[in-house]
Amino acid sequence: MDDVTIPFPMPRACPFNPPPQYAQLRAETPVRWAELTGGATAWLVTHYEGVRRVLTDPCFSADITHPGFPSTTPELLPALRGNRSFVRMDPPEHSRYRRALIPEFTVRRIEAMRPGIQSVVDAFIDDLLAGVPPVDLVETLAVPVPSMVICQLLGVPYTDHDFFQSSTRTLVSASSSPEQAMSAMRDLHGYLDELIGRKLREPADDLLGRLIARHLEPDGELTRQDLLMTCRLLLTAGHETTANMITLGTVALLENPDQLALLRADPGLLPGAVEELLRYLSIVDYFPARVAVEDVEIEGTRIRSGDGVFALLAAANWDPAMFDAPDRLDLRRGNRRHLAFGNGVHQCLGQNLARLELEIVFRTLFERIPRLRLAVPAERLPYKDDTPVYGMTELPVTW
């Protein structure tokens, strides 16, 4: 494979498996030079220890303004550099935002949201059951649940969810033109700026209101633009990733009836089941882009300062050196050292919320609709290969 140019990104050949090339790369050349969309180049790291190294070693920067930072949408880089969120920054700049947000996402605070999330899930399943099957689980449950939860957390009117969901889809889709993506970004920024202005005039006890009260300049450490970028990140990431995990996780369980039977027989397996689904599906595969800020060696390969790097989470989470039989969905798997939420200082801030939402949705869905099944074969379902957050556009189910 060394004498062949490797194009990147690569599509998944199976709905659940990582791209098939990952296994060969991991076995033969786990650190490999690849050609990106648009003609730029970057390293792909495909084995667990190498991916973890890239995510934790300060030799690799997450700062999108660094020359050489890799992107699969290079035409959007100037706009993204000018409107970057804290996940595309390094400490100590990144640490300033994270310190402000950590108190909002502790296990204790998120656990206090359980009754509210349960009520949201119950209400949407009530509506789903009131319909005539088949129904689209994406539209009726997978998207609206995390959208309403993040709206309630941030203090965003849920009546505006169609707008920000549409804007987010346009922003993350590789099929969007640069003009469409820029227009969506401007519209979303305008909306969020107006929302911040409203909360400045009318203080509220929600996450955004508390950030304004505690951290907004001149007395605090964040500017209005900082708040806008942070709110955009939380609003988009808070529903896009969880929605796709709900959708794909449902299909994975229905397509593995032996594992679903285990879960039905022992609901105590659910927390571990969520961890296994996160590992198995690895929907945020190549989002952890980095650029080397000094020369460094991984697995005998010299990566030079200024080289772009993609730490491939799906490849790491299917590394047989870390996980026995990684291609098997095993809800009793004891090893929970997956990297689905990243690692190091940039590990996903909202992981406690995502885990809780997934746990509540899967338990409630399969308890209340025990005869749930796919309305079409899994291979005929529409999967999203044009976005860095893998998922589905539609999931027809019946019962």
Image: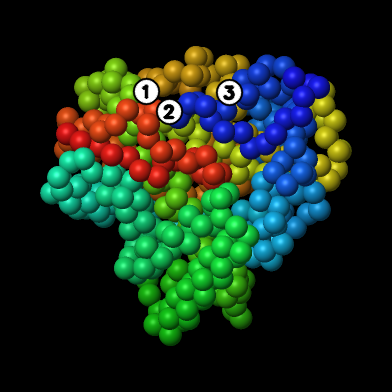
Among the 4 quarters of the image, the one containing residue 166: bottom left
Closest to the camera, between mark 2 and mark 3, is 3
Which residue matches tag 1? 331
- From what the image shows, is residue 369 above or below residue 138? above
Going by the picture, which residue comes out furthest to the top? 325
- From what the image shows, is residue 29 above or below residue 139? above
Q: Residue at horizontal 36%, vertical 39%?
A: 247
* Residue 269 drawn at (x, y percent): 31, 26
Looking at the picture, tell me which residue is in the foreground, 5 or 79: 5
The quarter in which the N terminus is drawn is top right
Q: Residue at horizontal 72%, vertical 41%?
A: 36
Q: Earlier in the sequence, mark 3 or mark 1?
A: 3
* Residue 61 drawn at (x, y percent): 74, 47
Helix, strand or loop under label 3: loop
At label 2, the amino acid type is Glu
Residue 282 in view, yes or no: yes
Are discs 2 and 1 less than 8 Å apart at CB? yes
Answer with left or right where residue 44 lies relative to residue 276: right
Which residue matches tag 3? 20
Which residue matches tag 2? 276
Answer with left or right where residue 395 lies relative to residue 280: left
Among the 4 quarters of the image, the one containing residue 186: bottom right
Q: Residue at horizontal 43%, vertical 85%?
A: 201
Q: Earlier in the sequence, mark 2 or mark 3?
A: 3
- From what the image shows, is residue 385 above or below residue 373? below
At label 3, the amino acid type is Pro
Residue 106 in view, yes or no: no
Q: Residues within 10 Å of mark 3 (few under 14, many from 20)?
A: some
Looking at the picture, tell me which residue is in the foreground, 246 or 2: 2
The quarter in which the C terminus is drawn is top left
Helix, strand or loop under label 1: loop
Helix, strand or loop under label 2: helix
